[in-house]
Image (cartoon, rainbow, N blue to C red):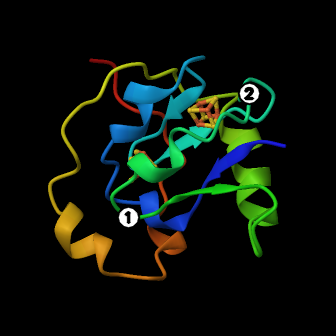
């Protein structure tokens, strides 16, 4: 089992989740984070930290495609270990239930 970042993260990227992960298994794209499913130890502490409820256990309904996306993009995006500022229009995007079309597959820009 693993935890998975789902649609709610897209274009918000609050990054509260990375602060609490004991194994630093979050990876950062331009406008979303993902969890590396083979590094996650299923502790669950990140799940309540996300302000938009964008972290789910892989047993939750509908999570399958997001698990595949997390597994794929964790291979190519850089690791993120520290909280940073959310994306500029996060409040607008937080209210949108469907935003897969807005996902960028680009890695986060180096800091
Ligand atoms: Fe990290 Fe635990 Fe969340 Fe997995 S469940 S991503 S190990 S904080
Ligand atoms: Fe994304 Fe929520 Fe973490 S918006 S960056 S999963 S705190």
Q: Which residue is mark 2?
A: 41
Q: Is mark 1 within 8 Å of ligand 2?
A: yes
Q: Are marks 2 and 1 in contact (CB under 8 Å)?
A: no
Give the vertical position of 33 relative to 55 (above or below): above
Quadrant for residue 70, please give it: top right
Q: Residue 52 at what x, y percent from top left?
A: 38, 64
- Circle nearer the N terminus (2, 1): 2
- In this picture, residue 70 sits left or right of residue 82: right
The residues bearing labels 2 and 1 have C-alpha atoms spaced at a distance of: 22 Å
Image quadrant for the C terminus?
top left
Q: Quadrant of the N terminus?
A: top right
Please, what secondary structure does the residue beneath circle 2 have? loop
In the figure, is residue 25 to the left or right of 94? right
Q: Which residue sits furthest left? A: 88
- Where 8 falls versus 40 (above or below)? below
Q: Is residue 1 left or right of residue 111?
A: right
Residue designated by label 1: 52
What residue is shown at x 22% (from left), y 62% (from top)? 90
Residue at the image point whose x is 78% and y is 55% from the top:
58
Q: Is mark 2 within 8 Å of ligand 1?
A: yes
State the residue in front, 62 or 70: 62
Q: Position of residue 18 (x, y in %)?
A: 43, 30
């Amino acid at each position: 089992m693993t935890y998975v970042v789902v649609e709610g993260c897209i274009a918000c990227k609050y990054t509260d989740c990375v602060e609490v992960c004991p194994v630093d298994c979050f990876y950062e794209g331009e406008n979303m984070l993902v969890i590396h499913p083979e590094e996650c130890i299923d502790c669950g502490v990140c799940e309540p930290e996300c302000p938009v409820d964008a972290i789910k256990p892989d047993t939750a309904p509908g999570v399958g495609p997001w698990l595949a996306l997390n597994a794929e993009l964790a291979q190519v995006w850089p690791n993120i270990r520290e909280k940073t500022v959310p994306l500029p229009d996060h409040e607008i995007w937080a209210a949108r239930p469907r935003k897969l079309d807005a996902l960028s597959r680009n890695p986060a820009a180096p800091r």
